[in-house]
Amino acid sequence: MPVDREEALRLGQFWATVSEEHNTDKFQTVLHDDFVMWYNFDPQDRTRAEFIETLKAAHAMFSNQKNENSQITVTESGFVLQATMTGILDGVAIRSPYCFIATIKDGKIIRGDEYFDTAQLSKKAGRPGEGMV
């Protein structure tokens, strides 16, 4: 059954906004208990708890995060968020396009698949071969 369009759009807008706030407690309010996160640069499923720990680690080294040119597209199973993440990583300004694909179940996000060009993050931060998360 397709997701509710308004609900998917609201969750997409929430995700784009709360990711700028670095508030993991607020982030968790939209995560399903069985939430799983996958990243293209480290292709393994992370549990809800592992995802929150990943966020905390990223937030510790990344500041002034903004999502520029955000576009949210509602799909049958959730939404796709495309944006350019900007901010300060290790004292250096960065810009990295990314795409987040969300699957919704019971009004919450149950799965996220995120694609980052980590070369945009590591080159500008002066850490060859290392990404932000």
Image (cartoon, grey):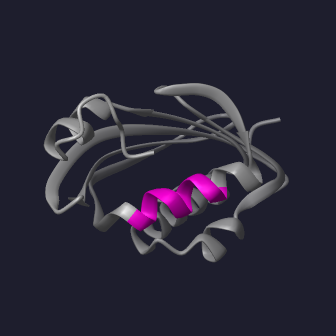
Q: Is residue 59 left or right of residue 126?
A: right
Residue at the spot 29% in from the left edge and 63% down from the top edge = 66
**The C terminus appears in which quarter of the rendering?**
top left
Query: Horizontal and vertical percent for residue 58?
Result: 45, 57
Is residue 17 rendered to the left or right of residue 87? right
Viewer-proximal residue, 49 or 83? 49
Position of 120 with respect to 50 (left or right) is: left
Q: Position of residue 124 (x, y in %)?
A: 14, 43
Q: Nearer the viewer, residue 22 or 102?
A: 22
Percent across and percent down for residue 26 are 62, 75
- Rendering quarter of residue 1: top right
Question: Which residues lie in the magenta part?
Answer: 52-60
- Classify 20 as above or below 35: below
* Residue 121, horizontal then vertical, whole percent: 25, 41
Foreground: 57 or 105? 57
Q: Quadrant of residue 96?
A: top left
Q: Main secondary structure of the magenta part?
A: helix
